[in-house]
Every structure is written in structure tokens, then in C-alpha cells.
Amino acid sequence: MHLHRLEKVWLLIGIGTLVMFLTIVGISAFAQGHHPPSDLTTLDPQKVDTTEPFNQPGLKKIGDNEYELVIVSQAFAFMPNDIKIPEGAKVHIIVTSKDVVHGLEIVGTNVNMMVTPGHVNSLTHTFHKPGSYLIICNEYCGTGHQMMSTKIEVTKA
Amino acid sequence: MKNTALHPNDGKLALAHIAVGYIALFLGAIAGLLQAFVRSGTLELPAGIGYYQLLTAHGVLLALVFTTFFIIGFLYASMSRTTGDLTPFAKKSAWIGFWLMTIGTAITTVMILLNKATVLYTFYAPLKASPWFYIGLTLVVVGSWVSGAGMFSQYAVWKKKNEGKPSPLLSFMAVATMILWIIATLGVAVTVLFQFIPWSFGLVDKINVLLSRTLFWYFGHPLVYFWLLPAYMCWYVIIPKIIGGKIFSDSLARLAFVLFVLFSIPVGFHHQILESGITPLWKFLQIVLTFMVIVPSLMTAFALFATFEISGREKGASGLFGWVKKLPWTDVRFFAPFMGMLVFIPGGAGGIINASNQMNQVVHNTLWVTGHFHLTVATTVALTFFGISYWLVPHLTGRTLTPRLNKLGIIQTVFWCIGMFLMSGAMHTVGLFGAPRRTAYTTYGDHPQALEWMSYQTIMAVGGAILFVAILMILYIVINLAVAAPKGTEEFPVGEVHEDAEKTPLLLENWKIWIGLSVVLIVIAYTVPVIDIIENAPSSPGFKFW
Amino acid sequence: MAKEFISDKKEQEIAQKKEYSLFGTFLSVLMLALFLILSWFGVYYLFIQRL
């Protein structure tokens, strides 16, 4: 098929740009470990309360300023409620749902993941700056969806 | 090619579709206006009506009903215009399709109004609506298939009569659009028929949530191309005629449509980037395929600018950008779709960002996404459909677009762009700050992060109010063109190919190859992850939280 | 001879038409690409900042 010379150049530039975007996110994901949350763990969504670690939602210290934060989401709340961690803490967030699909977003961070019943999702985030971080459900889950939130207080070290 | 009005029966058929489309637009817009005010905290809904109920109505009526009806009406009009009067079979299919879709829409709308289906238009399991909501949606989809069959037969009859000739470009594009639609809707049909309906009737207790979401998004992304391709038909074929130019390249236009059929389907995972149960590798593979579907849009951008530049130069324009001045800026049939094209630039840029793997974490389920599709479908596609209506409606009713209505249309377009600039601009910005989409008014206990969002939500309401005024204007114009404008003949503009353009290779018309390749790509992108989901993803009972 | 001449002329005409400058088009799509790149890196920067 005949292409105008400038259209060929344009398609090279355009496709080149797309390849550049893919390369940047590809390297960041596959070489530096910044994969989007894609946990493959599953559980019985009706037995969340008796399944480890969700039988004990909360913050657990697992290393030097390193924590595991287990969250259970259900309409229309997150468990545990108010969470306090020191500045610079590395937090492994593990979450599941007891009922419908929820979303877990920590405002102003890259923590953003779907919480599907029967599945566990997880992300690791380091809280560099102190302050109050809002955790919200960002997937419609029912009439009380806009009330579903909690906070993380990151205290000065 | 004749340019008299379509056969009255064909015209009636197209008009019926367009009429239902505009009724849906009106109802959906009312819901939209109320939502914008609720979200800004300026309005509390009177007893009984829920924010999420309105949101469900807004999504279903605008994203599914307005688009599908308008598109099928426009495609049938295009078939009749370019391949001759519809055959009895095509006509019959179209009417059966129309009534199935209309009955389905009515059932679904009633269920939403009765508050039995406040599950939003994506109806994510395990939120469980009344089975009649899903049955209504099924009728809409099945109706569209019957309509599609009518178009395919019309096309086949033309091909048989004109062996060895490439089909008229508009009919080729209409067929490509319906092929895309049918392959895509198979996914949603499977999940609704085999998962949602038995489950909502209580025949089975549980539903595989991840499977239903995956099948939904197998459909959900090509759905947006089903909206976009008819707009591209207008840009590629109709706009050149309106500006007094020629189609830049018939073959490249067909190639773009073929690429959309190939690459717009095996890409649904880019709506599920942040989801458990799908490995990062399979997500990334579909993201690469997603980026492939950007290529035909890059081709389209070049072809459109080239159409404008060549026609401007043929009219004596000089300099690098002299051709811009030769465009018919005061002709709303050009101006409205042109603004749609322009808005597709930020719309497309946002889309690339959304699909960029882990970058999705910045924007997923925030108002950014809402802002994004209010540029793409609610501006690019909507303004182009309005642009089509300005000549198609009077063409079908034997009336004319008067200078006064033309001027009103220009003002309508300007209002739309200003309203959308405010609303979508505020949505994009506040989305980057983390404000969630699909959420009623809340300050999250006056949390400082949420309080920062409030002024943006007020701007959204201002933009929404301007958009509603623009909706009233377009309805006034369309009703006028349908029943009150002076009698006369309004042209159905169909562009001709530039005499220097090369002959169209018939390979592009070999649907067996393209459908085959499309299936191969789908099989590659989906087989392994779907088997994995069927084997491993747990099922869940249903919930009704509204 | 005469016939050949005419078709030659016609071809020349076509060739001339094909020479229409599309540099305006080219610059327009380049600006489009620039917009895509700037907005993409804007959000990518935000992602990196929030790591």
C-alpha cells in the first residue's frame, strides 16, 4: 500500500514513541519490580474471619521499621481502623474482601488496588513523609460506599 | 450515487433508532446534571432517589442506549445510501432488532428506576441485581445482533451484484463496526447468560467474580471502539465532502478499520491492571496489544490533517498552515465533529496513560478516568454524532438545516466544549490528587486531603450545568429538524476518493482472513489466563447493598 | 507519438499533484506527538515521585 513519505516518517515517530513508553514501564516493572498489584493467592470469601492472616487484621512489625499491614474490607469499612506507623516505615499491605468488590487506595501514594472477594491483593509502600494519609474504597460497593475509609498516621521518627 | 432522500422506509427505520437514542440522551443527561450537583454538595436528592441509582441510569442510558441506537440508525442510513435500498431481509432484521433493543432498554430502565438494579452500568458481581435487569441488557445485545445480520446480508447482496469491485467505503466501515461489535459482545453474552442470569434467579448460589469481570472487560474495551468507529466513518468519509475536499486514501482508511477489528479486542486486561489473580506477564502482553490499537488512530490523525491540507491547497492556500483558514468554520456539520477530533488528542493522551501498566496505579478508579471518557465518548463521539444529526435528521425528514439552526449548533458546540473543559479538566486534576470516581458527596470526616478536592467538585458542577444547557440546545435543534424546519432537501454528504489515490486492494475486503486473525489474537491473549481463572478463582455468593 | 505525449503530460500532472506539500500535516501530527509525550511523562513523574 502506498504511503506518503511524511506519513512513513510520522508512523515511525509515533510507533517509536509507543515503543519508548512500553520500554520504560516494562523495565520499571520487570527489572525494578514495580509490577502492578497482581497477587495470585486465593481464599474462601465466606471464611475470611478464620483464614490466616485475615483472622487477625492489624499492623505487625516484621523487621527494622518494616511492617505487615493486614486489612479486611467489607461494606462499608476497613479493618483495622486507625493505623499509626513511624516515618520511613516500609509497609507490606495485604488485603481481601468479605463481601463485594472493593478498591483500596491510599490517597497521594501509588497504593491503589482492586480487592476482589476470594482473592488476596498486596502492595508494598514506604511512607517517606509524616502526616495523615486517607485510605478510601474507590470501587462502588453499595449505598454507603462514600463512607468507607480509614486513616494511616505516619508519625515523625 | 444518488443524493435524493433515502427510501422512505429506510429513512423511517434510521429515524426510529435516532429518536430512541435522543430520548435516552435526554434522560441520561438529567441524571448526569443531578449527580454533578450532589457530588459538589449543593444538592440533596429528594427522598427515595439514590446517587448510585442515578449513576446507574446515567451510564446505561448514555454509554449503552444512546450510543447503540444512534450508531445502528446511522449505519443503516449509510448502508441504504451507499448500497441502495435495503433488501426486505435487511429491513425485517433491522426492525426486529430495533424492537428487541427497545423492549430490552425499557425493562432495564424500569428495573433501575425501581431501585432493583443499582449496580452501575458495569454491574460487577457479586453485587446482585434483579434478573430482569440482566435480561433487559441481553435483549439489547441480541437485538443488535439481529440488526448486524441485516447489515451483513445487505452487504453480501451488494457484493454479489458487483463482483470484483471494492464495496462503498461507508458500507465497508459499517460492516467492520458490526463485526467488531459482535465479536466483542460474545464475551458479555457468555457472562450474562451463563453466570448472571442463573445466579440472579437463584438457580446457582455463587458466581466466579474474576471470570465475570474478565468476560465483561473482554467486551468493555472494544465497546469504546464500537462508539468511536462510527465517528471515524464521519471523519474519513463525510467530513471531506463537507469541506469540499476528497478522501485522502481509501485503502488506508480501510486498513485502519481492519486494524481496529484485530487489535481492539484482545486488550481487556488493561482495565484489570490492578486486579489479583492475573499474572503481570499476561497483563503486560495485553498492554502491548493495547498499544498496537493506537497505531490506526495515529494513521487517522495524519489522514485527517492531510485531507484538510490538500483541500485547502486545492483552494489556493499557501504557507505551512494557510489551509486552516480555508476550512468551513461556520458550518456546524464540520465544526462540531472537528471539535470532537481536537478533543480526541487529550482524550487519546489520557488513554495511553491509563493503559501504561503500573502507571495505572496513579489514576485507576479516580475521577481522572471519569474525566478521560467524558472527553472520548462524551465529547469526541457525542459531538461527532451531533454533527451527523445536523444533516442526517433533515435528510431523513425532508427538511433543511436553516442558517439559524446552524448558528445555534455552533453555539451548542462551543457550550459543550466550555462545559467539558471545566468538568473534565477538574476531574482530571482532582483525580491526580486521588479523588475517587463513582462516589457520592463526602469529605471523609473533613480529612484535609479530601477537603482539597471540594473546589474542583464545584467546578465539575458548573461544567455539568453548562453541559446540560447544551443538551437542551441539541434537543431543541434535533426536534426542530425532525418536525418543524422548512421542507427541502438536505444532502447526505459522502466523500469521494482523491483521483490520485491508488486502487483499493481487494485483500482488505477479505473478512475471512481478518476475522480469523482476530480470533487467533483473542485466543493467544486470553486462553491461558481464562483457563487459570476458571480453575483457580473462587466463587462468591451475591449481595444487595443498596 | 501524440498520444504518448498526452499521457506523458497527464502523468506529469498527476506527479505534480502528488507533490502537494504535507508539511503542515506533518507539523500538526508532530505537535500531537509532543502533547502525548509531555502528558505521559507528567504522570510518569508523578508515579516516580510517589514510589
Image: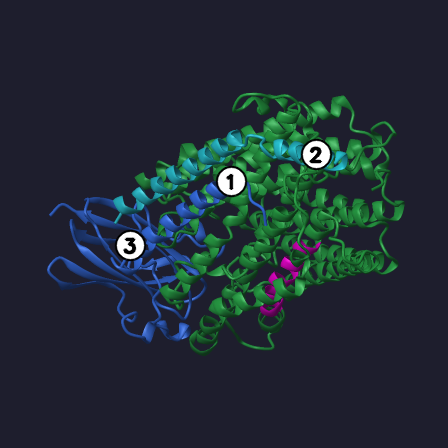
**Which residue, given by chain and number where applicable, does mark 2 sit on?**
C10
Question: Are there few (<14), some (14-19), or many (20+) residues within 10 Å of tag 2?
Answer: few
Q: Which of B313 and A107 is in front in this view?
A: B313
Relative image position of residue B300 (x, y in whole percent): 57, 43
Of the residues tagged 3 and 2, which is closer to the observer?
2
Are labels 3 and 2 on one chain? no
Q: Distance between the residues labelled 3 and 1?
A: 35 Å
Secondary structure beneath label 2: helix
Q: Which chain carries label 3?
A: A
Are labels 3 and 1 on one chain? yes
Question: Are there few (<14), some (14-19), or many (20+) residues within 10 Å of tag 1?
Answer: few
Majority SS type along the magenta span? helix
Residue at the image position 34 percent from the left and 53 percent from the top: A23
Of the residues tagged 2 and 1, which is closer to the observer?
2
Q: Which amino acid does label 1 sit on?
A: Arg
Of the numbered discs 3 and 1, the one sitting upstream in the chain is 1
Secondary structure beneath label 3: helix
Of the residues tagged 3 and 1, which is closer to the observer?
1
Q: Decide: is B383 above or below B362.
A: above
Q: Residues in magenta? A: B175-192
Q: Note the chain letter of the green one.
A: B
**Which residue, given by chain and number where applicable, does mark 3 sit on?**
A28
Q: In this view, does B392 lie to the left or right of B233?
A: right
Chain A colour is blue
Quarter holding the N terminus of chain B is top right
Q: Distance between the residues labelled 3 and 2?
A: 56 Å
Q: Decide: is A59 above or below B322.
A: below
Q: Do the residues labelled 2 and 1 touch (CB within 8 Å)?
A: no
**Which residue, given by chain and number where applicable, does mark 1 sit on?**
A5
